[in-house]
Amino acid sequence: MLESFLEKSAKYIFDTKRHTKRIENLLIIVPTRRAAYFFKRALAQCADRPFLAPEVLAIDDFVTKKCGVEIADNVSLLFELFDIFKEVDKNITFERYLQWGSMLLRDFDLIDQYLVDSDYLFDYITEAKAIERWEIDWPKNKISTDSERIKAYFELFSNLREVYQRFRQHLQSKKRVYRGLAYRTLAENTFELLLNDKEETNQPNSEETVEDSSPDFYFVGLSALSAAQEKIIRALIKAQRAEILWDTDHYYMRENPYIEGGKALRSYRDAAWAGEWKWTENHILQTPKDITVYAVPNASMQAKVAGKLYQQWCTEEQGGTENRPVAMVLADENLLVPVLNGLDETISDLNVTMGLTLRNSLLFTLVDSLFELQFTVAEFRAKDGRSVKIPKYNHRTVQKVLNHPFIRRYEFLALQQRDSTAPSIIQTTIGEIQRRNFVYLDPKQLLVWGENHPLFVALFGRWDDNPHTVIKALYVIIDLLREVYKDTQNAIETEYLYLFYTLLKQLETTLNSSHAEKLNLRTFKAFMYELIRQTRIPFSGEPVSPLQIMGMLETQSLDFERIIILSMNEGVFPASKRQNSLIPWDIAQEAGLPIYRDQDAVLSYHFYRLLQRAKDVHLVYVTDPSTYNGGEKSRFIRQLEHELVPMTKDKGTIRYQEMMVMFKEDDKQGAEEEPKVQIARQKAATIDWTVPKTPETIAFLIASLEKDGLYATHLNQYLKCSLQYYFNRIAGVSEDEEVEERIGSADFGSWIHKVLERIDLEYLMENKPITDEEVKAILREEFDKQFGGYDAESGINRLLYQVAEQTVVDFLREQRTRNDSLVVLATERKLSATLPLQWGDKTILFKVAGKIDRIELVDNVIRVADYKTGKIEQLPKVTPDKLADIMTSGSNGNYEKIRQLWIYQYLIYKQMLRDQGLNLRGQDFHLDNYEVTSGFYSLRNIKRGFIENPLQFDQANDPENYVAHSEEYLRAFITEKLLNTDEPFRKTDHMQACQYCDYKEICGR
């Protein structure tokens, strides 16, 4: 078991003889508070009896303590920086400021951490922007320098120097600082704040000699130092008041000088300002290591791999211990919840040392939906052409809010306690929206449906531009949801709720009257979202747990023998090259500010430092090209593969292997090379859907045939896809009702059919002329009846409405022009016929039925007409050799149309033969005097006229033969297909038919 760096450092400091009697007066500075805890723990192991421990601080805490200042919170800093900016630039708006305010704070922080000459930096920026503006002034440039946007852009940079200076003076006058300013203050006043307090920090006792000049400060485990940190430490070392202990390795300090992680440390060593270099060890190349790289298919799969690995170790009794925990390092901190969920239920002894961002919570999605709801403004077009904006909620955002998991949980626990059978106000509201097809909703209507319940008042009350109104509404929602959380065991979501509540309190306190004037609804949202982005749940747990889940920065100075690092993808670890700064990267580099290369070097050091004392390393990356920078493995993995592993090939100290984690078809053991991690997950395979026809199914079909009858649509549906017929007609599977914002093709057809039916009934069958204005009036009346929630004055609906008007008007004109003798006999006429069928030992009387759009008379021909809003050019000619295929094939759309006309013509013939004629509008029509045909009117191809049914069973084509042949095919369909138990319901082989099928998700198409 290798000695950890903190154990070695603690032992070194404790064993230094000159400190044995005054160790309690030392000050130990480490990178993080977590490292401070483990250093104290290591120091406690150095003696077998109690002793007074020295003070151990994280370096940030050390700086703020010695400066005697308070680190201000980001909320206050953002507002105070805006106040300063407003003094310099009267035209600045808070909305524009929020776009880069946080970025500017970060820039000021870095300027002070790296002791940048601010005058030089801002002069450089001013001159660079002057050149940029000069280029814009060139005659050929299309950008106008007179635009407000361009002026504001250049004014921002010209004001940076004055804003920076005023902001620093303002904070220092109140003894409040941001982190970088604290570092600069200590670095520029080291003598007064550190070196001049010898009497306070190192008071000798009676047993000590005054001449004792041993160090008072130990800096342990630091790596890439900022300029301020370096200046502070160098001043203390020069005064012989400090010693620094480095944690470095021979591999990146000497053997491979191209590793960027050792660049800064090599420069410190070569400069020799730190004195004797302590320490450079040779663990990476000399100590045995197993390094395994896993390629996984998607990001969430990483959590399963990590959980399986740790579970396997625990099963083999090789899991972590309190003294030697396992580290699970998340390069992508968004994986925290999936990782926690991916651990086995038996694993409860763990510690999470990273925060969980509030932005990843379900609570944030609810808040985001509420802002989306409030920003809804419906735009309508008035009759005079003006655009009118009305503050109505869009149905999508309303249903999104009402279907949110928290709201539905509240509904279950609070709204249905009195009567669980009655619909709740949420169910009522969603039902009314869908039933009435309301696209835009008035807040007052929602409150009526919600019975003015406090939840609905909070959710759907209109917010004004006062941020306090928003905060008040969110308080009400939190109070209501708090009742829900009492009954839930989700501790993380409960913590989210509390954290959001405290954030609102902080906002409310900060938004005094002067600040509130700066914020409207949109700027308040932007400001609050920025705070949410920065806010994290700080997990608390037992620091010495066997499993430590942490981010990479939390691993500083800590050592683990067994490590799992997730998201080892380029663009994540290290992060993509983004300069999140107002300062151009070339100017930042020139001024001595860190750029993305420096950030990469810091991460490189942390990565290799983790490898130093580790024995078992597992690196996981994602191969999915749609995530994590195209699924490219991290450069650090490639460095291991191509640089580190070849160096140890002769010694064999590093065993390196790569694994591919895949979804398994079964649980059988794979080849020896297969990784230990087994993800037993079934592949999404194509299912050969078949549903047998049981006696119960046959009984249901027979009852349906006898009661409701066989329609042409049912016959066509079965022939096209019998599984679709099963879902629709037998299983009764239907899609949820949804609000449609645009008129669908089916609704469009129903609307046109209803309009033509009314025109036939009210005008043509009454022998009354009809004008275009009357046609348009009927169109509007039927539209309002059928589509009360639609907006017909804008978007695609307006176009469809105009198409409908033109279609109906043109159709009626074409009919008047083409057929003066046309007489409408009936509209929307229902016809049916009953046929006997021998089924086993009993006779079934099944019905054939249909609803005919129009029956009309042209000269001596009775025409059974069906309207089609789609385009039909011509139906194919039916020859005897095609007849059987037409009557049994479901793969041809034209065959479906022919079968529909066939059924209609059969029903007319059947009734006329049965009743010795057909009585319509008080007149008898007999087959001896009139011919009968069926056909379509294609409303998209009006000039085509009446498209007749081409189906003939024989040359004679007389009514008796037509009926006889028809009934022969109908009986064959029922016995050989519909009721045939040897032919189960199965999905079609014709994939084109699945394109618009409602059930394709069920059957896997």
Image: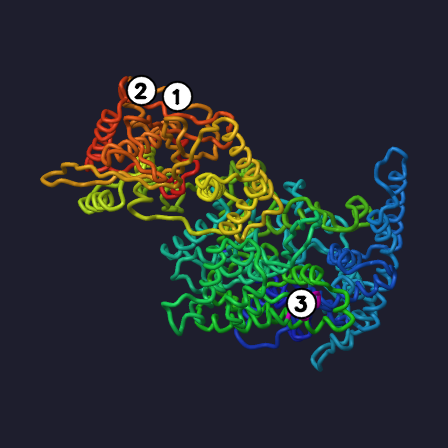
Please report the bounds of the magenta region as a residue range.
Answer: 463-471
Along the viewing direction, whichever of 721 and 931 lies nearer the viewer: 931
Q: Position of residue 856 (x, y in %)?
A: 40, 33
Q: Is residue 6 left or right of residue 185?
A: left
Decide: few, some or many residues near mark 3? Use Cα within 10 Å; few <14, some 14-19, many ≥20: many
596 inside magenta stretch? no
Task: Please give the name of the residue rendered at 77% of the width and 60% of the height, measured from the top-left corner.
Answer: 94
- Mark 3 highlights which residue? 28
Q: Are marks 1 and 2 in contact (CB under 8 Å)?
A: yes
Could you tell me which quadrant the C terminus lies in?
top left
Q: Quadrant of residue 905?
A: top left
Q: Secondary structure at mark 2?
A: helix
The kind of residue tagged 2 is Lys
Task: Please give the name of the residue rendered at 28% of the width and 21% of the height, measured from the top-left corner.
Answer: 957
Along the viewing direction, whichever of 169 and 988 lies nearer the viewer: 988
- Mark 1 highlights which residue? 876
Decide: few, some or many residues near mark 2? Use Cα within 10 Å; few <14, some 14-19, many ≥20: few
Q: Residue furthest bottom?
A: 206
Real-space Cα separation, disc 1 to disc 2, in angstroms: 10 Å
Q: Position of residue 289 (x, y in %)?
A: 49, 46
- Marks 1 and 3, the one that precedes in the sequence: 3
Q: Quadrant of residue 56?
A: bottom right
The kind of residue tagged 3 is Ile
Along the viewing direction, whichever of 463 and 848 lies nearer the viewer: 848
Q: Secondary structure at mark 3?
A: strand
- Marks 1 and 2, the one that precedes in the sequence: 1
- Mark 2 highlights which residue? 882
Above-or-below relation of 686 to 355: above
Q: Quadrant of residue 821?
A: top left
